[in-house]
Image (cartoon, rainbow, N blue to C red):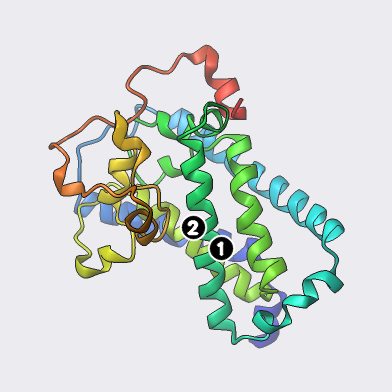
Amino acid sequence: MHKLLVSIQPQDFQIIAFFLLVGIFEACERLRPARKIDRWADLKIDLMSFSFAVLMNRICTHAILTAANAVAPARVLGGLHAIQALPGVAKMVLAVLLADFVIYWIHRAQHRTNVLWRTHAWHHSAEYLYWFSGFRTSFLHSLIYNIPQATIPMLIFKLSPLQTGICYSVGMLIQFWEHTNVRVNIGPLQWLFISPEYHRVHHSVGQECRMNLGTTFSLWDRMFGTYVDPATMPEGFQLGLGEPIDKKKIPRMLLGI
């Protein structure tokens, strides 16, 4: 059994986790939907975006790790032996925490500069949020986010394939969780983690889209002044960019330019 786990690659965990999560979140959305949505309205766009996102994830991860290994060889990264010697669970928790902190600031920059906003606008074009809509990302969006997501667990913390696969599965869980169309109250955990309601505020039309930027932990927004309480939002507030998508612009938006 141990040999089998060692031989499994991180990508294998992602595939297994993906299909498990599809079943879980589809059932949850059917049983306890937060909003009435038209799943068919953007299904073709979402399928195209998902296929594109998976392809870009594979390409970007491989390219980033190859480049990082060339720029920062093992003897340099070996200077991090103190954190690399930590227990596996501690390393995984720290890797997720550090990656989310870096992504918070990347995400914040995307909403404050025109150049970076173009890498992110495609993600905000979704007018209906459900578990599949979170995969609507541009090429440059995937590239930028994959830098911390690939280098932090694999190069800085030297996670094993099993540990890396678990972290990737957690990342995929978060991707489903934050975009799912489920009405749920997580109670006191909201002080640490984001919720679908929390992230729905971020996808709203208006200035609130520049708030609630955390992708896993809500504490960054609370610490750095970008938190909006979902309870203060009007019922059924509009999501998306506030205007129809010009089909001629879709190729450019997919690239993120």
Q: Amino acid at mark 2?
A: Met
Whether the residues at callouts 1 and 2 have beta carbons within 8 Å, the answer is yes
Q: Decide if residue 206 is on the left or right side of residue 106.
A: left
Q: Is residue 251 above or below residue 127?
A: above
In the picture as drawn, the residue positioned furthest to the front comes out as 224
Q: Amino acid at mark 1?
A: Tyr
Q: How many marks?
A: 2
Residue 168: mark: 1
Left or right placement of residue 121 versus residue 147 in this view: left
In the image, 116 versus 34, the foreground residue is 116
Residue position marked by numbered label 2 in the rendering = 172
Q: Residues within 10 Å of mark 1 (few under 14, many from 20)?
A: many
Judged left or right of residue 26, residue 58 is right
SS at badge 1: helix
Quarter of the picture containing the C terminus is: top right
Q: CA distance from mark 1 to mark 2?
A: 6 Å
Q: Measured from the top left, where is residue 196 in percent x and y?
A: 29, 51
Q: Foreground: 90 or 76? A: 76
